[in-house]
């Protein structure tokens, strides 16, 4: 249910851009999300169908590109994605690491006609 608030943000942004470009249909929305974000693109698409009552968003496809979280080695300063290590820094072997969780959310592009 937490997708509702973010969907309202997406809906308002997409409508504003569609109106500014005199679009009659929104075909696709590309979201960019951190890999620690827990939003589900399919649920966002479903909510957009309910919110869009004038046909502008009928059948809109919502896709997501996930960006990896980063890990920082506090000893040597190396930065790498959390998928690139086995519990130690790949550069110096330290276990003194900090996970910088990526929970970003961005509307990257909108495909309209």
Image (cartoon, grey):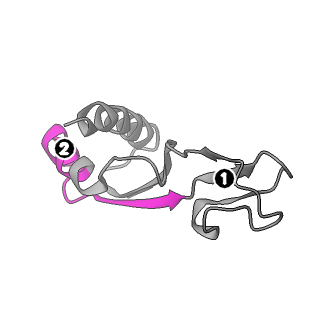
Q: What is the tally of numbered marks visible in this picture?
A: 2
Q: Which residue is farthest right?
A: 76
**Which residue matches tag 2?**
47
Which portion, as a residue range, is magenta?
45-67
Quarter-of-image position of residue 51: top left
Residue 56 percent location from the top left of the image: 25, 48
Quarter of the image for the N terminus: give it. Answer: top left
Magenta span contains residue 91: no
* Contact check, label 2 and label 1, Cβ < 8 Å: no
Residue 25 percent location from the top left of the image: 30, 54
Quarter-of-image position of residue 13: top left
Figure check: 86 above or below 78: below
Q: Secondary structure at mark 1?
A: strand
Q: Is tag 2's residue or tag 1's residue first in the polypeptide sequence?
A: 2
Quarter-of-image position of residue 41: bottom left
The residue at the point 83 percent across, 48 percent down is 75
The residue at the point 61 percent across, 62 percent down is 87
Q: Would residue 89 be found to the left or right of residue 14 on screen?
A: right
Q: Would residue 66 be found to the left or right of residue 85 on screen?
A: left
**Which residue matches tag 1?**
71
Q: Secondary structure at mark 2?
A: helix
The residue at the point 35 percent across, 47 percent down is 38
The residue at the point 24 percent across, 52 percent down is 45
Quarter of the image for the C terminus: give it. Answer: bottom left
Observer-nearest of 75 and 106: 75
How packed mark 1 is, by other alpha carbons closer than 10 Å (few <14, some 14-19, many 20 or more), is: many
């Amino acid at each position: 249910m937490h997708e509702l608030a973010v969907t309202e943000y997406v809906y308002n942004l997409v409508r504003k851009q569609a109106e500014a470009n005199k679009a009659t249909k929104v075909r696709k929305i590309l979201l960019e999300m951190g890999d620690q974000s827990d939003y589900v693109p399919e649920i966002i698409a479903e909510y957009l169908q309910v919110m869009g009552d004038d046909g502008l968003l009928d059948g809109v496809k919502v896709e997501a590109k996930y960006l990896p979280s980063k890990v920082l080695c506090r000893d040597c300063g190396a930065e790498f994605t959390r998928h690139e290590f086995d519990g130690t820094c790949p550069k110096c072997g330290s276990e003194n690491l900090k996970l910088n969780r990526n929970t970003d959310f961005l509307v990257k592009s909108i495909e309209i006609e």
